[in-house]
Image (cartoon, helix red, strand yellow):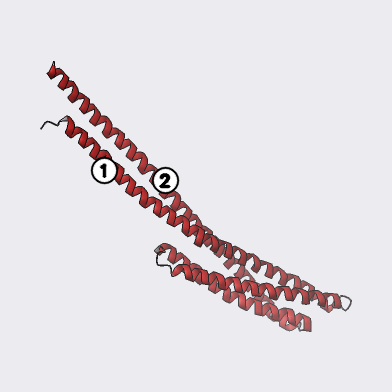
Amino acid sequence: MKITIVKLILLLSGVLLTLQLSVGIYADLQVASIGHEIKNISEKDMPLTKGITLMVEHQLEQEILYEKAFKEGLKLQNPLLKVKAEQKVNETINKFNTLGNKVSKEMKEIEVLLATFIDDPDLEEHSKTEFNKLLKDIKSLEDTHKIWVEHSQLALNSLLSGDLQTVISIEQDIEHEAEVLTHGSEKLLFDIEELTDQAIKLTLKHEEDLVVSIIISLILSTIVSILVTYHLVSLLKKGFKSAE
């Protein structure tokens, strides 16, 4: 069956239009997906990273304050150093308690933030699973922190009252709890960084897919145009020869 010039031009227009529409629809979907992912990173991952980082920083500062107060408390056994040491211990305990309340508050804020994210109906299942793990870990860390604070306060108050027996009996527990807190905090930071990194990589992949699809579309459009133009020129040449 012979293809006329008009049909060939219409075919070329139809193919090019179909390619443009397909790429346009795909590009719109990809851009929407990328926009959604960037929004999740800025509104979920980044605030969460900031909150966890701040909480971990304060929790580590609290551990340092305990060590400082404990070291000063040991000087209470020396009559020459007792007055000054007692003053420093009380000052450090006040800072310790203030910072402890701040850490507890920050942990609660992180839990509320995670619960809000998990309840988001538009959240992907993978992200929901990861946020649930983080929520479980932060609650476990909160329980350990509460016990550690209670034991630390008991040890410092026992030092002030001269009850060294109590200090000796719970010091090993305090060290173990502090170690659990440190490891738990490090795991939280690693997990949220990993989650954010995965989200960024996914966004970059979608961007790359979009660029590749546009390039492929341009190549296909060029090939189709060349083939149809070649065929069109051939038909025109035949037409001119027939006219002669």
Packing grade of label 1 (10 A; few <14, some 14-19, many >=20) is: few
Residue at 77% across, 77% down: 90
Mark on residue 208? 2
> Does residue 24 appear left or right of residue 107 in this picture?
left
Quadrant of the image containing the N terminus: top left
Above or below, 185 relative to 163: above
Mark on residue 18? 1
In the rendered image, residue 87, in percent from the top left (x then y), is placed at 82, 76
Q: In which quarter of the image is residue 231?
A: top left
Nearest the viewer among 15 and 67 is 15
In the rendered image, residue 190, in percent from the top left (x then y), is placed at 54, 60
Badge 2 or badge 1: first in the primary sequence: 1
Instruction: List the single residue furthest toward the left.
Output: 1
Say what amino acid the circle numbered 1 marks. Thr
> Does residue 36 appear left or right of residue 169 in this picture?
left
In the rendered image, residue 157, in percent from the top left (x then y), is placed at 74, 81
In the rendered image, residue 193, in percent from the top left (x then y), is placed at 53, 58
Discs 2/1, front: 1
Kind of element beneath mark 2: helix
> Does residue 243 appear left or right of residue 163 in this picture?
left
Residue 61 in view (yes/no)? yes
Kind of element beneath mark 1: helix
Q: Quadrant of residue 75?
A: bottom right
Residue at 17% across, 30% down: 5
Mark 2–mark 1 Cα distance, whole angstroms, equals 22 Å
Residue at 44% across, 52% down: 203
Above or below, 93 relative to 39: below
Residue 176 in view (yes/no)? no
Above or below, 214 relative to 143: above
Say what amino acid the circle numbered 2 marks. Glu
Nearest the viewer among 53 and 117 is 117
